[in-house]
Amino acid sequence: MAYAAGVRAQDTSFPTRPVRIIVPFAAGGPTDVIVRIIAEALSERWKQPVVVENRGGGGTIVGTNALAQAAGDGYTIGVATNSFVINPAIRPRLPYDTARAFTAVGMLVTSPFVLVAWPDLAPKNLAELIAFAKRESSPIAYASPGPGTGGQMAGELLQLKAGIRMEHVPYNGSAPALTDVLAGRVPLMFDLWSSVRPYVEAGRLKVLAVATDAPLPDAPQYPTIATTFPGFSVSAFQAMVAPAGTPPAAIRRIAADLREVVASERFATQVRPLGVEPAPSTAAELETFLQGEMAKWREVARSSNIVLE
């Protein structure tokens, strides 16, 4: 991936016609809602329609491939989420080259993962969990929304860092996985803080650790995994990318306006109820982040022998 450096001398003549944003999910989900908020704000600034096109399917591959094949003229941009950086590590037959087919534009939002457990599980924190896992003769099970999801990859990363064995129990979505953890059928899972917070506050789940490298702003009492294993950081994110070859002037204009929208109080008020935090960035900052995430998940997939056909 590449980015267009600098924000000076923006091409204020861009855009002169409608802009399309490809969302690699079906309409109506959280990502779609957030992108439609972005689209409305950019349309107001540009005095041009900004059209959201939903291209779900294939674990985001269908929509991402549509973006890769789009003309690199600035008039088609798209959304990248965790799957964007995980898929290259675990899927050897992607129809596009993630590292070369896209140009970074800017980050939209992030949402922290936390490691939660069934309340009756003996360990009360990360240190106790690691000691417990090392004592047990069989691996401790953890649930996830499915193979290749952020929940699974966070569990695999923890195993590598802590030197413990865990058994991945995949589900078809986060809701059934969470249901079984709440029922005690599977003791652990990594999930979004916004999803599990009501159950934690009700005493139906307990937080063992926070997966991001900084404490939760609204629950700083929970320690981070990074305190024990520096550099450990897993969060859900949504970002904007464009097809490779998009003119630098167009990238500069989109990136600068996108950053202003995401940094606005209006945007924060609109998206925080969805359980996400605005994360304005430059194109260069997003490029660095995406490269780091892809390298991290390549190492996890290689070490854990995770391959999805």
Image (spheres, grey):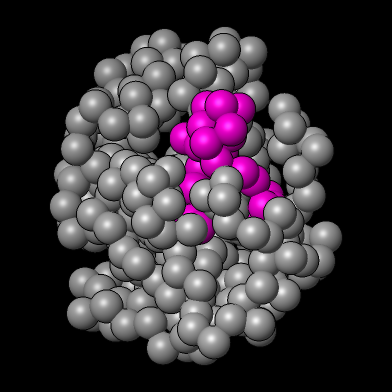
> Is residue 202 part of the magenta span, yes or no?
yes
**Residue at x-position 32% and y-position 17%:** 48
What's drawn in magenta, residue-wise?
188-211
Between residue 299 and residue 253, name the one nearer to us.
299
Between residue 41 and residue 164, name the one nearer to us.
164
Between residue 211 and residue 4, name the one nearer to us.
211
For the C terminus, give its image quadrant: bottom left
Q: Position of residue 152 (x, y in %)?
A: 43, 65
Q: Is residue 63 above or below residue 7?
A: below
**Residue at x-position 77% and y-position 61%:** 226
Q: Is 129 situated left or right of 15 in this image?
A: right
Q: Is residue 205 above or below residue 277?
A: below
Q: Position of residue 43 (x, y in %)?
A: 37, 17
Q: Is residue 31 visible?
A: yes
**Residue at x-position 64% and y-position 46%:** 207
Q: Position of residue 198 (x, y in %)?
A: 52, 27
Q: Is residue 1 visible?
A: no
**Residue at x-position 53% and y-position 64%:** 154
Q: Is 152 situated left or right of 17 in this image?
A: right
